[in-house]
Amino acid sequence: MLRRLPIYLLLDCSESMAGDPLKAVETGVMSMISTLRKNPHALETAFLSVLTFDAKARVAAPLTELISFTMPKLTFRPGTSLGAALDLLREQMAKEIVLNTKEVKGDFKPLVFILTDGQPTDAWSEAAARLRSSSAIKATIYAIGCGDEVDFETLSKIAHYCLHTDDLTKEALGSVFAWVSASVGSRSTRPEVEGEGEVQDIPLKPGLKLIDIKNPPKFTGQNKRVYLHVLCSKTHKPFLIRYQLLPNSPNYGIKDILIVSDDFLSEGALKSPPIDANRLGGMPVCPHCGALGWFQCTCGTLNCINLEKSKNNIVTCANCHQLGRLAAAAGAFNVDGSVG
């Protein structure tokens, strides 16, 4: 019976990963697969699974032999439900991994790689405890944090090893997955070794550094990004405005504006603390109709300001359809963003 080396990739697909970062992750995973397929040891033993997490956790690809694995298309949604991903990992391992018995040697000890650029938005500690208490299956877990908003205090309580790369560029994530490829390749040559520290030391790629999990960097908790979900007043289609904290300032500037799927908010979004709209600089352009700016309805929905549809500054909310007169707020007002 073939003894497999199970590899699980847990990929953060929150809205902060939208655009180039998510494309870079896809490219990095495909490059990793290509590299491992050239390694006869990995080709013989490695089986790969991809789990994604945003507002929910999903099985993007079940455990599949390396030669037959096809990289799934990654899509982004609000939220970073790492706790749900850990629960899903535990469930998938229980279903997919063959355990040792008196008659049969089961699969080798699994490797888990978590890639995230933020902090969990759900009850991760309970899920981590459930994973640790699952005595039948023990995996070696690596957590790789990307960017400047990673909560390593949390990740150090989940993973056996934590690594950090400063940004989410194609080059940075390429280094991450090159290192993952080397780690899996090394393990595939000696998969029978047991114990938490069994993976050989692999030289870190440029831009990747090891975090001391006994003394991880303190997480400030400051939101460096704000995400606004807006409906087009003309087409009623959603889009996303992403703001980034400006250097040496308490205010935010527009990072980019993205069209999202019609069901983008079908599973809801986790709200961030309301933020003073005066701290959000720049004039966003609706990607659907070209309207400038946005207004907030009394129902809380954000809409683009489509003056072509309005008369005498009367606007209609694309969500609740109530009419209202467009007017500047008297002083500061708060707007709800979401956690990405």
Image: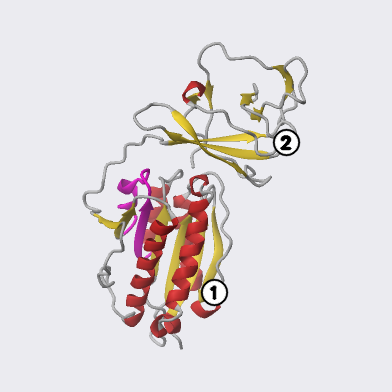
Residue count near mark 1 (Cα–Cα under 10 Å), binned few <14, some 14–19, many ≥20: some
Q: Secondary structure at mark 2?
A: loop
Q: Could you tell me residue 127's position as x and y percent? A: 42, 53
Residue stretch rendered in magenta on the structure: 134-159
The residue where tag 1 is placed is 69
Is 136 magenta? The answer is yes
Q: Position of residue 250 (x, y in %)?
A: 39, 26
The reply to whether residue 4 is visible in this rendering is no
- The disc placed on residue 236 is 2
Amino acid identity at mark 2: His
Mark 2 crowdedness (10 Å alpha carbons): few <14, some 14-19, many ≥20: some
104 or 122, nearer to the observer: 122
Q: Position of residue 113 (x, y in %)?
A: 40, 62
Q: Is residue 48 visible?
A: yes
> Amino acid under label 1?
Phe
Query: Which residue is at 64% across, 21% downward?
Result: 298
Q: 230 above or below 177? A: above
